[in-house]
Image: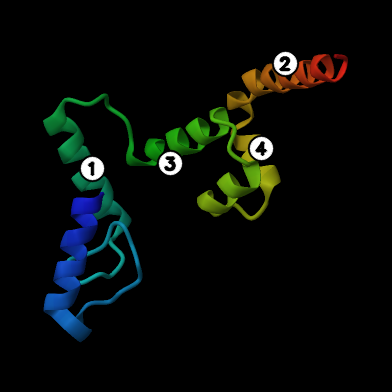
Amino acid sequence: MRKHRKRQMETKLQLGPEFTDLDLVISTHKGAPMNQRSISKDFYIVRDQLGLPKIRFHDLRHTHATLLLQLGENVKVISERLGHSSVNITLEVYAHAMPDMQKSAADSFSSALNLNQH
């Protein structure tokens, strides 16, 4: 990502006012948003070249959110990252990733009670 960002900044300097700086990770050469189909097509080409599992580009978004939930990240933060209009949407879509979180919360609470008894 650092190398990619460095190349973007070099291109921005070279193009000057022709570069549209929207602070995007994935953009056209001139900084503008890319077409969704182009992103997916490029992703599938690279995925196949690297011999990665047959996943869709959108599956990366799902994996990102699921991993953040499993790591205990705040659901509000995840919801904002995904652009959901409410935390409830995030909780409904990713509820499957949360069963272990209930056990973890119960274990943490139990540990806290045990610490307070000494």
Question: How many residues crowd mark 4 within 10 Å: few (<14), some (14–19), many (20+)?
Answer: some
| Distance (Cα) linking label 4 and label 3 | 15 Å
Q: Image check: 3 left or right of 24?
A: left
Q: Nearer the viewer, residue 37 or 102?
A: 102
Label 2 sits on residue: 107
Residue occupying the point 16% across, 39% down: 45
Between marks 3 and 1, how big is the CA–CA gap? Answer: 13 Å
Graded by Cα atoms within 10 Å as few (under 14), some (14 to 19) or many (20 or more), the crowding at tag 3 reads few
Q: Nearer the viewer, mark 2 or mark 3?
A: 2
Q: Amino acid at mark 3?
A: Arg
**Dot 1: within a 10 Å radius of its alpha carbon, few (fewer than 14), some, or many (20 or more) residues?**
some
Q: Based on the displayed image, in which of its 4 quarters is residue 104 positioned?
A: top right
Helix, strand or loop at disc 3? Answer: helix
> Which residue in the structure is indicated by mark 1?
43
| x, y percent for residue 47 | 20, 34
Task: Pick whichever, 104 or 100, lies toward us.
Answer: 104
Q: Nearer the viewer, residue 34 or 72?
A: 72
What label does residue 54 carry, if any?
none
- Asked if the residue under mark 4 is in contact with the one under mark 2, i.e. CB atoms within 8 Å, the reply is no
Q: Secondary structure at mark 2?
A: helix
Q: Which residue is mark 3?
A: 61
Dot 1 amino acid type: Phe
Instruction: Find residue 70 and report its horizontal and vertical position in percent.
Output: 55, 28
